[in-house]
Image: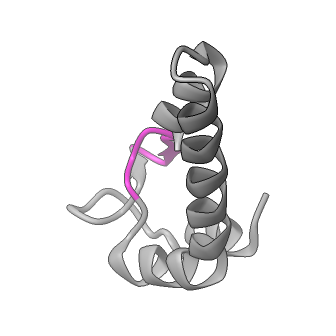
Amino acid sequence: MTEPLRSARTACRGPSSICPCAGGNWRDDAPLPPDLQDEYTREYGWMIDEGMEALNHAIAIKPNYDDAMAYLNLL
């Protein structure tokens, strides 16, 4: 688990509009609070961009490359 997510779990004090818990249980589908989103983007944004660039290059070489399209959709 990354440090921003670990921090979010320990900092959470209960349900609210930006708190990712529901009744004390962590929800993986809840968005990160805005300050953690910014931290995550600063720390890992370059990796996402690099991955998208590589997948777009693969699709440009082989337009029907289904695996590359699927992974690009996940990013």
Quadrant placement of the N terminus: bottom right
Q: Quadrant of residue 59?
A: top right
Extreme residue toward the front, this view? 61
Is 55 covered by the magenta stretch?
A: no
Extreme residue toward the right, this view? 1
Q: Is residue 72 above or below residue 1?
A: above
Q: Is residue 8 left or right of residue 67?
A: left
Which residue lies at the image location 44% right of the left edge and 73% below the top edge? 37
Residue 27 coordinates in the image, percent (x, y): 48, 41
Which residue lies at the image location 41% right of the left edge and 55% below the top edge? 20
What is the span of residues highlighted in magenta in the rendered image? 23-31
Q: Quadrant of residue 22?
A: top left
Q: Main secondary structure of the magenta part?
A: loop
Which residue lies at the image location 52% right of the left edge and 22% below the top edge? 63
Q: Quadrant of residue 10?
A: bottom right
Residue 13 coordinates in the image, percent (x, y): 45, 69
Which residue lies at the image location 65% right of the left edge and 81% below the top edge? 43
Is 26 covered by the magenta stretch?
A: yes
